[in-house]
Image (cartoon, grey):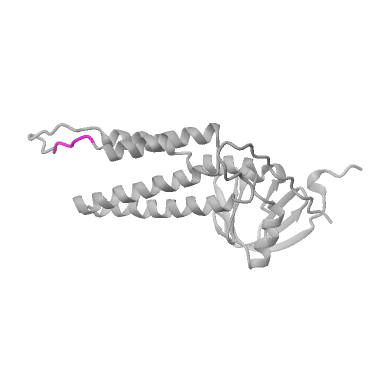
Amino acid sequence: MTMTTHDAQPTLHLEVEARIGRQGGWYLHLAPEWLRLIARDTDESVVVTRAEVAQRLMLRGSLLAVELDQGRAVFELGDARQVEQVSTWIGPPTTDDLRVAQQRRLRWGIPIGLLILVSALPVAGDASTKVQAEAFDPWAAVLGTVLIGLALVVRWRPHRQLFLVEAAWFIGLTVFAAHRLLAIGSLWWILPVIAGLAGAWGSVETYFGFARVVSATPGDPVSPPERSDPSP
């Protein structure tokens, strides 16, 4: 009888804890061509094949995020050894991982950029409705235009260096929001300040995460490394 991909025996068994999207303890089984998560207390299981890794898995520190049919679940690995074992199974990031990561981070780039551009337009004042006149905001226009451009570029030519452009954009957002916070005094501007700082940190962290795969020279052809067979 021919053994299918999912029939292959797992080579590694781990125990993890669900943190987001699911609850309780789970068993994590790793085979050469698939990963399976099985809930301890229910019959629920999640299978991710090696071909789906770029689309469905993301390992950040000790947290393993898994894209489900509906939503996402995040599992916490127990220790550094487990992190190393799962990282080895996933293998070094490929160009597909780069494309998915950049498109995932900028999936709302175009609509958000358009909203920022609209907010940059001048507004005529109206004394009867107490609407204050607003001049054209060039800084908001630049932020909106750059974000839309960045979201379009990653669709056709993803590159590691674009994470640095993204980080610069988030820094620009932070400066813009901080200026508005000081000028207007509305505490709501604290939210984009925090979002900008977190986004810049995430962009730089992801940039270094892809250092092993993507050429540091823009325009150089990039070939994904061959993944080693984890089977004994």
Q: Nearer the viewer, residue 40 or 186?
A: 186
Q: Is residue 116 magenta?
A: no
Picture layout, residue 64 above or below residue 165:
below
Q: Nearer the viewer, residue 224 or 180?
A: 224
What predominant SS class does the magenta segment belong to? loop
Task: Name the quadrant of the N terminus.
Answer: top right
Task: Name the quadrant of the C terminus.
Answer: bottom right
Q: Nearer the viewer, residue 52 or 148?
A: 148
The residue depicted at 47 percent of the width and 47 percent of the height is 164
Most distant residue in the left direction: 128
> Left or right: where does residue 138 sit relative to residue 199?
left
> Left or right: where does residue 49 sit relative to residue 232?
left
Q: Which residues are magenta?
A: 132-136
The residue depicted at 24 percent of the width and 37 percent of the height is 137
Residue 223 lies in quadrant: top right
**Which x, y percent locates residue 105?**
49, 44
Using the rendered image of the protein, determine whether residue 109 is visible from the camera's viewpoint.
Answer: yes
Picture layout, residue 42 above or below residue 180:
below
Using the rendered image of the protein, determine whether residue 40 is visible from the camera's viewpoint.
Answer: no
Tell how many labels: 0
Q: Nearer the viewer, residue 109 or 226?
A: 226
The residue depicted at 71 percent of the width and 51 percent of the height is 35
> Left or right: where does residue 24 sit relative to residue 180?
right
**Which x, y percent locates residue 55?**
62, 42
**Which x, y percent locates residue 138?**
27, 37
Most distant residue in the right direction: 1
**Which x, y percent locates residue 90?**
68, 52
